Amino acid sequence: MALSRIVVYGPTTSRVGKILWTVGEAGAQYERDERSIAALKADSEYMRIQPKGTVPTLVCEMAGAPPFVVNESNSAVAYLASKLSPGGLYPATAEGVANAWQWLEWGESSVAASQSPVWFGLVKRGGYPPGTPLRVERGPDGHASVVNDKSVAALLRVWSTLERHLASDGRTFVQGDRLTMADVTVGVHANRLFHIPPDAIGVDVRASMPRTHDYYQRLCERVPYRAHVLPFGMP
Ligand SMILES: N[C@@H](CCC(=O)N[C@@H](CS)C(=O)NCC(=O)O)C(=O)O
């Protein structure tokens, strides 16, 4: 059933950006409710449709059916990909879908866990979790080695997975030669990776991860990525 209305709840964050990028790639229209997280949590109707109280939340309308509500940004991305771009952003086979989910999960779990403390520490100059004091340990060379209790080496190690993956079969995008939903969470985090100051960590990831950097540059050529993801890589 075709979607007649798409509403994305939440202030503009990188996870909201994932959903807007997906909709943008599919060429669909959407509406926003950009209230703050605090304002949404105080709204009993929002808490009814989204008991976790987090953002983003996606509400989609279809003729003759009750509105469909989904939270968890990866679930929202996968749902929109399947409705708006079957066989395109949403892989055509069960194996392709499972493979894409591997990368959606990797981005939201492994990459986010290693990168968020470093990103919020070195780029946003804050503690992580938000509200805690910033903690940075430096090695003898003065470079940050541990930021907000997460090792920079672990961050570089997690990204080496994608570097090796892109090298195998000369992939242009995560699943091959075209963009799919598998790129969405990875792409959002890649944007942050390439905005971590090389001087702070003593590694220029553009040089040490050339395939990942080429991949990032290919993403930057895409108008919806530039509109909805790039702003979240800005210090
Ligand atoms: N895994 C969830 C995480 C959602 C999440 O934690 N969102 C943050 C903002 S990016 C939030 O709502 N934080 C407020 C809270 O946890 O109360 C997703 O991907 O949507």
Image: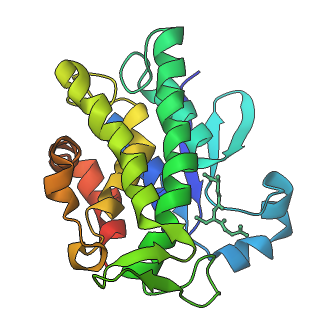
Q: Is residue 131 above or below residue 166?
A: below
Give how far across and how far down residue 198 sits, in percent.
22, 72
**Quadrant of the image containing the N terminus:** top right
- Residue visible at 44% across and 11% down? 92
Which quarter of the picture shows residue 39? bottom right
Q: How many marks?
A: 0
- Residue visible at 29% across and 33% down? 164
Q: Is residue 195 above or below residue 141?
A: above
- Looking at the picture, tell me which residue is in the foreground, 218 or 149: 149
- Residue visible at 21% across and 22% down? 177
Asked whether, in this view, residue 21 is left or right of residue 222, the answer is: right
Give how far across and how far down residue 57 sits, in percent.
65, 53
- Looking at the picture, tell me which residue is in the foreground, 34 or 18: 18
Q: Is residue 155 above or below residue 128?
A: above
- Residue visible at 57% across and 32% down? 79
Q: Is residue 128 visible?
A: yes
- Looking at the picture, tell me which residue is in the foreground, 70 or 191: 191
Which quarter of the picture shows residue 11? bottom right
Which quarter of the picture shows residue 192? bottom left
Q: Is residue 9 above or below residue 80?
A: below
Asked whether, in this view, residue 49 is left or right of residue 94, the answer is: right
Give how far across and how far down residue 153 sits, in percent.
40, 60
